Amino acid sequence: MAKRKTIRTIPRERAEVGEQDPQARIRNFDEVTLRFTPEQARHEADRCIECPRPACTPGCPVGVDVKGFIMKVSAGDLRGAYEVITETNLLPAVCGRVCPQENQCEGACVVGNQFAPVAIGRLERFVGDTAIANGWSSIPYIEPSGFRIGIVGSGPAGMACAADMAKAGCDVTVYEAFHVPGGVLRYGIPDFRLPNTVIDAEIANLEKLGVKFECNTLVGRLFTIEQMIEEMGFHAVFIGTGAGYPSFLGIPGDNLNGVLSANELLTRCNMMKAKDGGFDTPLPIGARVAVIGAGNTAMDAMRVCRRLGAEQVHCIYRRSRAEAPARVEEVHHAEQEGIDFHWLTAPVEILDDGKGGVRGMRCIRMELGEPDASGRRRPVVVKGSEYEFDCDLVVVAIGTNANPIIGQTSKIKLDKRGYIATDDDLATSLAGVYAGGDIVTGAATVIQAMGAGRKAARGMKRYLGLRDTETVYGPATAPEATLFGLDPAEHNFVRVRTA
């Protein structure tokens, strides 16, 4: 008799997590969204229908085996789920918080055709947070290759490249211009979205792989890319410096005191501890703040200003809410926190208070015309619709450009926008030098930067004559346990073998 197939009942409703009350959270920098409980995580994992050919994994820029880790969560094997994720993504607690899953893995989820898609991001965060809480890590057992690798920039692209090259047996050193590693994760994202403790834990796992971090080191000033290859003994170099050079408006008044970039605001708040008090970090926050732009960085800037004591915070955006590039969740949270949105509005002048400061802004109404090159409808001026409103601080969040220092201090080829030019393997015009992330593509997501770092690592390994590798997880053997002083019953190891 043929064996009858067991049919599971799939929960239709998503497991909903709580949030801090908006009136409470605008007075602190604690996380807004709470994490899953184990029961909620199991419920959500049980909503996965186990597609034979899952669309969620191709939707992930680093190819996380989404179905595989969710099945582990459903079975209660959280350590196994962590190992599945970290085969391709070394930052699950970070990506589970800040990745736009609605446009990637969750956007491709088949369950979403009829119900809410499986909350893949929240499950990834749950697994990552569980790993941090329990001190889980995969200890490397890797034969040294004899190659030295230099990484410029400790953001997500640099971290991903560093991890893959360390697993290939290379001696990896990461150079960071700031005083602590983390790149844009550290300076660009507030604690209420990504706590520094999470970044610290993920960096500690890199250090366990043998990756070394050299902070307060500005490559291009202390030494050049060419010197890294020709004089410092690096066999290959990866550039992942991001694109943190701010854009401004080019309108009258944008050089007044009281006009600053969102990057400067967030860096002073996040890294220079202006939010904590007791630190000599100048950060003027007005009573009435206007933030220009509607991306995730703009949302972060507005919500930071609210927490730092601004009485009114206005968002000025020339398109409608439907075209706003920020995550829907971030716009929703900003609205809950009392941000005043001026959709279809463009600034035309920042008004001088007579003392070199800001007293207000002159804006004009817009309407949407035909789509432009980005696919979004082009904003068109409504004649005679100018108006003024009062503000005493203007924050510009309209995008960033490549930092010019690498291009100015090396012979590396740049594209017409000033970003580093690469081939399909992310190799630059200098032999042995690779680049990836925002410094190549312009501003993108954390997980896309990580995907670029891993792609560059594959190219670097081919350049060095290293065969590509795969990570194999399993219990520690007795020799390994002796070598590392660990209990083989309690610790798993990473072994890297040639593919």
Image (cartoon, rainbow, N blue to C red):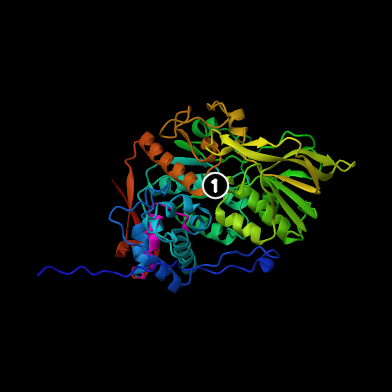
Q: Quadrant of residue 349?
A: top right
In the image: residue 33, left or right of residue 3: right
Q: Position of residue 100 (x, y in %)?
A: 50, 52
Please state which of residues 314 and 157 is positioned toward the viewer in this rendering: 314
Q: Is residue 149 above or below residue 474?
A: above
Q: Quadrant of residue 39?
A: bottom left
Residue at screen point 55% across, 52% down: 327
Q: Circle 1 sits in a helix, a strand or a loop, which is it?
A: loop
Please state which of residues 85 and 23 is positioned toward the viewer in this rendering: 23
Residue at screen point 36% across, 67% down: 46
Identify the magenta region.
Answer: 76-92
Q: Position of residue 439 (x, y in %)?
A: 54, 37
Judge whether residue 241 can be spotted in this image: yes
Instruction: Report the amino acid beneath label 1.
Output: Ser
Identify residue for label 1: 154
Please state which of residues 334 and 357 is positioned toward the viewer in this rendering: 334
Judge whether residue 147 can be spotted in this image: no
Q: Position of residue 13 (x, y in %)?
A: 43, 67
Q: Quadrant of residue 383?
A: top right
> Which quadrant does the N terminus fall into?
bottom left
Q: Position of residue 101 (x, y in %)?
A: 47, 53
Please tell me how crowded label 1 is: few (under 14), some (14-19), or many (20+) other residues with Cα within 10 Å: many
